[in-house]
């Protein structure tokens, strides 16, 4: 079963992202029906262990923290995102979530490491330890604006977007969803200190 763990932005940031979507609406291919979020972790875990890993999450000893939005960029070639500045609070939460659940990740269900990373010893090490080449030092926090025509980057001007860069918000909780096909079932919110 697939599980995703998210942090969510403030209402002010959500409104700014929605305003950005309006500004670029002619280049949008699709807008996700999921809440606007930043992914802390996405993984497969046997449903048998669901209760066990959920019971570990309230034990995380992380304080709430501020994050700032940076520039916009393409992610996975066709998703327009606004980057979230990495800081010690976000890094601690990301690593703590992985530490809490990694023993429940069945190694046989982890997707093989992409060919583009097999010759990168640092990526291989992170993949072997955490089951993903996109975590730890390679974690790239962002909030997705929309799936777009990649050509938008040829014409997009940072100053033409309505004030995303520099916005700040407090991360005071994270959420866990169980994913079955296109259904995202919320399993709970976990509040930071």
Image: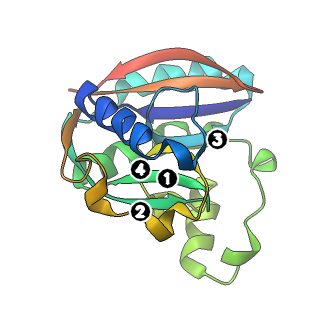
For marks 2 and 3, the one nearer the N-term is 3
Q: Residues within 10 Å of mark 3 (few under 14, many from 20)?
A: many
Report which quarter residue 149 is drawn in: bottom right
**Tag nearer the camera, 2 or 3:** 2
Q: Disc 3 marks which residue?
A: 43
Q: Disc 1 marks which residue?
A: 80
User: Would you place residue 165 above or below residue 22 in this image?
Assistant: below
Report how far apart the C-alphas of labels 1 and 4 lie in the structure: 10 Å
Cβ atoms at labels 3 and 4 below 8 Å apart? no
**Tag nearer the camera, 1 or 2:** 2
Residue at 44% across, 25% down: 175
**Tag nearer the camera, 3 or 1:** 1
Q: Disc 2 marks which residue?
A: 156
Circle number at residue 142: 4
For marks 3 and 1, the one nearer the N-term is 3
Give left or right: position of 152 versus 173: right
């Amino acid at each position: 079963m697939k599980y995703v763990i998210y942090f969510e932005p403030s209402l002010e940031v959500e409104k700014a992202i929605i305003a950005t979507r309006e500004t670029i609406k002619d280049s949008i291919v699709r807008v996700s029906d999921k809440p606007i979020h930043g992914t802390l972790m996405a993984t497969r875990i046997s449903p048998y262990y669901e209760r066990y890993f959920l019971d570990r999450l309230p034990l995380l000893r992380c304080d709430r923290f501020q994050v700032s939005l940076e520039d916009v960029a393409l992610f996975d070639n066709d998703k327009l995102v606004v980057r979230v500045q990495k800081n010690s609070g976000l890094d601690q939460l990301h690593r703590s979530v992985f530490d809490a659940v990694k023993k429940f990740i069945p190694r046989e269900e982890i997707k093989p490491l992409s060919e583009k990373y097999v010759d990168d010893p640092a990526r291989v090490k992170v993949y072997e330890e955490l089951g993903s080449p996109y975590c730890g030092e390679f974690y790239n926090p962002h909030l997705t604006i929309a799936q777009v025509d990649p050509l938008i980057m040829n014409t997009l001007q940072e100053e033409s977007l309505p004030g995303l860069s520099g916005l700040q918000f407090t991360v005071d909780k994270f959420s866990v969803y169980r994913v079955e096909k296109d259904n995202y079932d919320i399993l709970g919110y976990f509040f930071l200190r």
